[in-house]
Image: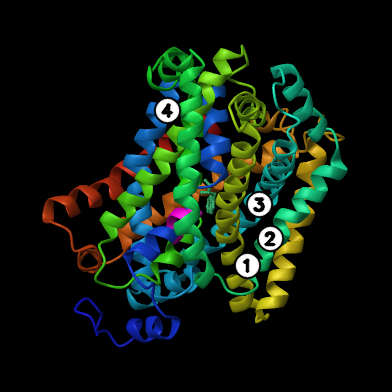
Amino acid sequence: MSASSPTTATGALDGANEKRGLWSSRMAFILAATGSAVGLGNVWKFPYITGENGGGAFVLVYMLCIAAVGLPIMMAEVVIGRRGGRSPVNSIRHITQRDVLSSRWSIVGIIGVLAAFLILSFYSVIGGWAVSYVGTTASGQLTGQSAEAIGALFSNLLADPGTLLLWHTVFMALVMAVVVKGVRAGLERAVSILMPALFVLLLTVVGYAMTTGHFGAGVSFLFKPDFSQLSTSGVLVALGHAFFTLSLGMAIMMAYGSYLPKDISIAKTSITVSLMDTVVALLAGLAIFPIVFANGLEAGAGPGLIFQTLPLAFGHMPMGSLFGSLFFILLIFAAWTSGISLLEPLVEWLEEQKGMNRVRSTLGAGIACWLLGIASILSLNLWSDVAPLGMFAMFEGKTVFDLLDYLTSNILLPLGGLLVAVFTGWFMAKDALQSELSMSATGFNIWYATLRYLAPVAVMIVFVYNLI
Ligand code: TRP
């Protein structure tokens, strides 16, 4: 038994962990957590919401949200997972039983499972766009094309439900194929090769962006804050994205934390994961915005932004077809590892709660997600004018796709995160947290105060401003 193992009668934590097997090392946890965190959120979503929300001020608020809200909550999720040593819903239940807390806290796990389901449905559609762009770039049809031609190519893709459905199906099948086998073994190795590769290719595009002559404009758009450009809803988007990009508010870090050996520093590991995630997002921004300005494109073009800008770069750089297809392949891998981490909790939950076996629960969850994804596909073309909850002011003009994105990133994830912060900061035993984190007294106190006061208050203020 390790020094920090609990000795209460209901403890039995180490027993639970021994049966489930632990990560082979700190590196393995970092890889799996980074594989979940780094995905479409960094390369696709971060640049487009930055463009829509005016740049620098948004980026600054986003980074503050990562540091002051995201990081402490990530640490809290990992603590709960390691302390509980079980799947998220059961870890929380276990801690509540031992510390005699209300069993209603397991709602956190339920919110997580629901959010995962909704996110994966549209995540897979966007993953499908990336799949389709491998062929587009490899075929060489982008070479030397104008911004208009490349824009038209993208519009044609969105206008064609059949093609979108095909690639959505391919992406979902990829995710299901891994989840059905149980995820950990293959994931570690794949992430350790593919993440560095994605990094290098992003740097390549940044290198190209430097030659466009508009690199300075891109840099100042990203890093020169102009607060007149930022609305209160922009602050909510920044906060929601901090949760989305770090895979928080949905108990996935709890699930991964349950496999983390006791002697590994939760603080250092969480900082590493958050830093890598942020660096990838900023690199994506540095790659994209110079191209936007060099070609007179619209920074606020929306979800299509990377599909309208990066192909331009690949169409004009030497060996662009090769780099381009490699880039989209790596983006698929990044999205794939994230997609796996979205489906896994759902499948585990079905196994535990409904007693289904792995194959049936993967098929059930995967097909349900796939079906809901079809609604997102249609909202890009045939249903582009349909706003299902349009009668409510806050959902006005939102298509199915917009609605799913809003509901998850801006409501469910922050709500899940808020509950995690309150549960850990106000209800879990402080000495248990101290022994799990084993940080310096100052470090612990900063984390504890942030988790008890700053993070919940920040989330609540942003909620009140935007939802009421
Ligand atoms: N973080 C991933 C991305 O940025 C998406 C993701 C994977 C996610 N798992 C999650 C988001 C869990 C929220 C919760 O692409």
**Residues at marks 2 and 4, CA–CA distance in whole angstroms:** 33 Å
**Residues at marks 3 and 4, CA–CA distance in whole angstroms:** 26 Å
Q: Which numbered tag is attached to residue 118?
A: 3
Q: Position of residue 255 (x, y in %)?
A: 46, 67
Q: Position of residue 36 (x, y in %)?
A: 50, 55
Residue contact between numbered discs 2 and 3, judged by CB atoms under 8 Å: no
**Residues at marks 2 and 3, CA–CA distance in whole angstroms:** 18 Å
Residue contact between numbered discs 1 and 4, judged by CB atoms under 8 Å: no
Closest to the camera, between mark 3 and mark 4, is 4
Which residue is found at the position 29% from the left and 49% from the top? 452
Query: Measured along the vertical axis of the image, is residue 276 above or below residue 212?
Result: below
**Residues at marks 1 and 3, CA–CA distance in whole angstroms:** 19 Å
Q: Earlier in the sequence, mark 1 or mark 3?
A: 3
Query: Would you name the residue on which mark 4 appears?
Result: 59
Question: In which quadrant of the rendered image does the C terminus lie?
Answer: top right
Q: Amino acid at mark 2?
A: Leu
Q: Residues within 10 Å of mark 2 (few under 14, many from 20)?
A: some
Q: Can residue 11 be seen here?
A: no
